[in-house]
Image (cartoon, rainbow, N blue to C red):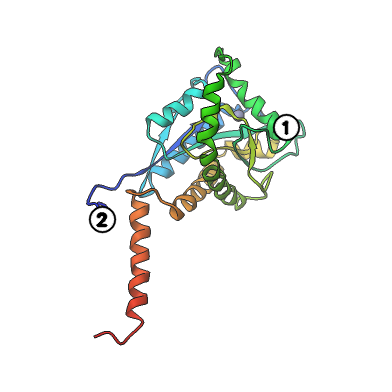
Amino acid sequence: MRDPVTGKPLRALVIAIDAGHGGQDPGAHGPGGRREKDITLAIARELARQVNATPGYRAYLTRDSDFFIPLNQRARLARQAKADMFVSIHADAAENPAARGSSVFVLSLKGASSQRARWLADTENAADLIGGVKVAPGNTLASVLLDLTQSGNMRASEHAAGEVLSGLAQLGPNHKDTVERANFAVLRTSDTPAMLVETAFISNPEEEQRLSNPASQQAIARAVLGGVNSYFSRQPPPGTLLAAQLEARTQAVASVATGGTGGSP
Ligand SMILES: [Zn+2]
């Protein structure tokens, strides 16, 4: 399909899906022995399958098997794939085995929205240490530049994350019903709306079962994609199928409006 205005082929929206952890970094463990890295890969693959089955979308997986990728490399891969959005998939863990539900996080370079969000970002950022990545001392200029580009991106990320959180609410009560913020290294993408989804608690025996069940994995993927699609349907980037569809709807409404006024010859 081509853009009705420019005649150029319409491009697909690229959703970068990042399966958290991998390789020597297993992530969290469930009481039944399930590993976060396997669950995130299964959900990420299912999400990619659903994204590719949706007209106007294309999925990009940062990893499609069990290997380790440094956190900053994940965003770089997404950028190379010209991603329009970055979604990192994880499973949460807590000492309290009753803790349950989904939460969605966006990047904040200026403090976290809660103690737990800060703790979680520290835990997730430790992946690089587990993987043996030498973390360079903070480059001040780079972080100032990142800060500037991020501020415009923050709103887009929060908005998109809010849609995904609403999608997940349809599966059951969310762990947190607002989008949380913390300094997640994997979300430092600079120019793409980015979020980290803690799908459910692998530390909760019931949720560990659910996270390992293909039907539930499909439902989680469907909920995430529903949120992504609500976000992009409202503000589709120019030159995409969604933008052309929105334009067609707007024109249809306009022609009904003019046709309905009457009196014209
Ligand atoms: Zn994780």
| Residue that label 2 marks | 5
Asked whether residue 20 is in view, the answer is no
The reply, left or right, for residue 4 in relation to residue 170 is left
**Residue at the disc numbered 1:** 94
Q: Position of residue 119 (x, y in %)?
A: 70, 29
Q: Quadrant of the C terminus?
A: bottom left
The residue drawn where x is 52% and y is 19% is 23
Q: Amino acid at mark 1?
A: Ala
* Amino acid at circle 2: Val
Identify the residue at the far left of this view: 7
Whole-angstrom CA distance, mark 1 to mark 2, is: 52 Å
Residue at 58% x, 14% y is 137
On the question of residue 26 being in view, the answer is yes
* Helix, strand or loop for disc 1: loop
Work out whether residue 250 or residue 230 is closer to the camera in this orientation and state it.
250
Are there few (<14), some (14-19), or many (20+) residues within 10 Å of tag 2? few
Tell me how many marks there are: 2
- Helix, strand or loop under label 2: loop
- Callout in the foreground (1, 2): 2
Looking at this view, name the residue that lies furthest to the bottom: 263
